[in-house]
């Protein structure tokens, strides 16, 4: 007989194993063993209790904390009930006061003060060179002084006339020089203006390179379902966005013969209301079409009936046919005197 088991921590150093639907075995002498570890002896049951239809068994788990890792799957067996199931082992506080996996560290912090001096760069603007100013020689026209002095003698007139002639000649020479040197300057300025007004020649643009090859297609990113395949059971349960992916990964691991992982994932999805996971578990436990050497060591009529009932109540049409086949099988067993079949019919077909 295979029943669903659940484990949770109670008092320090103690663990409680809940056997679902086995309250009628209250008071029987029971022991707990771990088939995966030959070094762990069978654990006696310290205390029994009943909660609804479930049987609660308390064991001493103080010494198991050195062997069993929290949040990891392990097999638990109750030989007296012929019950074997895989569970997630919880974190249990030891009575010895030494919590496993706790490391105390004291870190010293030092404060460092760094002063960063920032220097602003002074941006100097280039000096604007003034345009050269062409200086022209100014011609100073000296006006001949007026001689107001009265000539005292007629002999001074020729001398004054010669001086006036010299000034007249000098003025004429200066005017000639001014005309020769000042006329070309406006033309030079016009040439400079014409040069400045000439439009700038546009540089020829480099020819564009023709795109002959199409852009490479981006590589497809792996789907979230492919990512779940590399995760542990607790990570899949915690990180999967919905129960559909948990059920899908559980069925994949069953096909890959990772039976313990597959059953744990399906049980988690079923506990969250996924009808596909319920139907899959019902088919695994059903004695109608049970297969030896699979994920479940032996058929369980009550577990199959319970999962089929929950799937139908959840709206699964696919669970109706296997549930009817199981009912027919149970009725034949009950007619032949099988009390467990009769009780199963009473509990799950009202």
Image: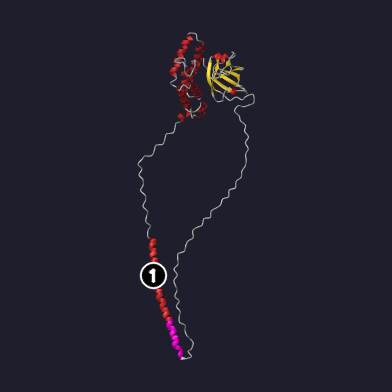
Residue farthest toward the bottom in the current orientation of the protein: 153
> According to the image, label 1 marks what residue?
184
Would you say residue 159 is visible in this rendering? Answer: yes
The answer to which quarter of the image holds residue 51 is top right
Residue at 44% in and 19% down: 320
Whether the magenta-drawn stretch holds residue 255 is answered as no
> Neighbour class for label 1 at 10 Å: few (<14), some, many (≥20)?
few
Image colouring: secondary structure
User: In this view of the protein, which residue sits in the foreground, 308 or 105?
Assistant: 105
Residue at 55% in and 21% down: 6
**Whole-percent x, y for residue 9 in the image:** 59, 23
**Whole-percent x, y for residue 31 in the image:** 58, 15
The answer to which quarter of the image holds residue 11 is top right
Residue farthest toward the top in the current orientation of the protein: 336
**Whole-percent x, y for residue 85 in the image:** 52, 19
Would you say residue 275 is visible in this rendering? Answer: no
Tell me if residue 21 comes above or below residue 70 in the rendering. Answer: above
Whether the magenta-drawn stretch holds residue 163 is answered as yes
Magenta highlight: main SS? helix
**Quick check: 114 left or right of 335?**
right
**Whole-percent x, y for residue 67 in the image:** 58, 23
The magenta segment is 154-166
User: In this view of the protein, which residue sits in the foreground, 10 or 97?
Assistant: 97
Residue farthest toward the right in the current orientation of the protein: 96
- Numbered-mark total: 1
């Amino acid at each position: 007989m295979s029943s669903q088991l659940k484990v949770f921590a109670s008092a320090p150093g103690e663990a409680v194993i809940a056997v679902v639907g086995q309250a009628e075995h209250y008071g029987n002498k029971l022991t707990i063993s771990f088939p995966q570890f030959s070094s762990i002896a069978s654990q006696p049951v310290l205390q029994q209790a009943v909660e609804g239809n479930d049987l609660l068994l308390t064991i001493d788990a103080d010494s198991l904390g050195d062997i069993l890792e929290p949040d990891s799957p392990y097999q638990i067996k109750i030989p007296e009930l012929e019950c074997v199931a895989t569970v997630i082992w919880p974190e249990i506080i030891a009575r010895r006061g030494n919590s496993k996996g706790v490391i105390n560290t004291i870190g010293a912090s030092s404060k460092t003060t760094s002063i960063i001096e920032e220097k602003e760069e002074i941006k100097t603007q280039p000096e604007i060179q003034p345009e050269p100013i062409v200086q022209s020689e100014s011609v100073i026209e000296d006006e001949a002084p007026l001689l107001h002095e009265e000539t005292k003698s007629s002999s001074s007139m020729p001398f004054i006339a010669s001086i006036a002639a010299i000034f007249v000649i000098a003025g004429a020479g200066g005017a000639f020089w001014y005309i020769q040197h000042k006329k070309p300057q406006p033309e030079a300025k016009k040439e400079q203006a014409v040069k400045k007004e000439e439009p700038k020649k546009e540089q020829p643009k480099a020819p564009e390179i023709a795109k002959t090859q199409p852009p490479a297609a981006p590589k497809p990113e792996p789907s979230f379902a492919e990512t779940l395949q590399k995760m542990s059971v607790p990570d899949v349960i915690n990180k999967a966005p919905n129960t559909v992916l948990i059920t899908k990964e559980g069925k994949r691991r069953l096909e890959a013969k990772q039976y313990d992982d597959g059953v744990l994932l399906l049980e988690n999805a079923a506990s969250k209301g996924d009808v596909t996971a319920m139907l899959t578990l019902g088919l695994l436990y059903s004695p109608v079409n049970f297969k030896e050497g699979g994920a479940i060591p032996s058929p369980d009529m009550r577990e199959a009936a319970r999962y089929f009932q929950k799937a139908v109540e959840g709206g699964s049409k696919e669970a109706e046919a296997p549930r009817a086949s199981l009912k027919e099988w149970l009725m034949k067993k009950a007619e032949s005197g099988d009390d467990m079949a009769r009780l199963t019919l009473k509990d799950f077909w009202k």
